[in-house]
Amino acid sequence: MSSEFGDLKIDQIGVVTNNLDRIADYFREKFGVDFVSFETTQKNAKIKIALTNLGDVQLELIQVLEGETIHTDFLKRKGEGLHHIGFFVKDLDEKLRIAEEKGMKVVEQGEIVGVRYAYLDTEKDIGITLEFIQV
């Protein structure tokens, strides 16, 4: 997709779950897919993340182990499932400037293991959160 944002393609699908290992095991058993997983602290919460590449798209599984995050809010409102679609970008600040001009606010941003990200407040408009991930 080409626009003021440049050429965007879906690079990541994020799934929020109460049991990351269950989903990772399912993909491993059914499709032979292995994940790289790690735990990290994010804004007073402890989360577990597992990543794998399925062709050109990264699948991210997210489980909150302790604390409250945007993900726990999602789980309370909707249950487990598709949380976000992510776009890998070179200049996160520039993409956020454009998003702001287009009326898309940032609901959360931060850094996990050296990777900057920002979730946009798009769920109320399109039913899903969009994320920019700086690569």
Image (cartoon, rainbow, N blue to C red):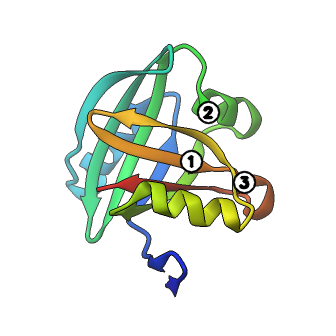
Q: Amino acid at mark 1?
A: Tyr
Q: Are the residues at dot 2 and dot 1 in contact (C-beta closer than 8 Å)?
A: yes
- The residue lying at 40 percent from left, 33 percent from top is 20
From where the camera sits, is residue 82 visible?
no
Helix, strand or loop at label 2? It is helix
The alpha-carbon separation of the residues under discs 3 and 2 comes to: 12 Å
Position of residue 19 relative to residue 121, above or below, is above
From where the camera sits, is residue 81 visible?
yes
- The residue lying at 76 percent from left, 35 percent from top is 77
Within 10 angstroms of label 1, few (less than 14), some, or many (20 or more) residues?
Answer: many
Q: Which residue is mark 2?
A: 70
Helix, strand or loop at label 1? It is strand
Within 10 angstroms of label 2, few (less than 14), some, or many (20 or more) residues?
Answer: few
Q: Amino acid at mark 3?
A: Glu
Of all residues, the one furthest to the right in this rendering is: 124
Q: Earlier in the sequence, mark 3 or mark 2?
A: 2
- Percent coordinates x, y for residue 94 in the rendering: 47, 62
Helix, strand or loop at label 3? It is helix
Q: Which residue is mark 3?
A: 123
Which numbered dot is residue 41?
none
Q: Quadrant of the C terminus?
A: bottom left
Single out the mark in the foreground, 1 or 3.
1
Q: Which residue is mark 1?
A: 119
The alpha-carbon separation of the residues under discs 1 and 3 comes to: 10 Å
Single out the mark in the foreground, 2 or 1.
1
Toward which corner of the image does residue 76 lie, by quadrant? Answer: top right
Q: Amino acid at mark 2?
A: Ile
Q: Is residue 36 left or right of residue 39?
A: left
The alpha-carbon separation of the residues under discs 2 and 1 comes to: 9 Å
| Front residue (pair 133, 4) | 4
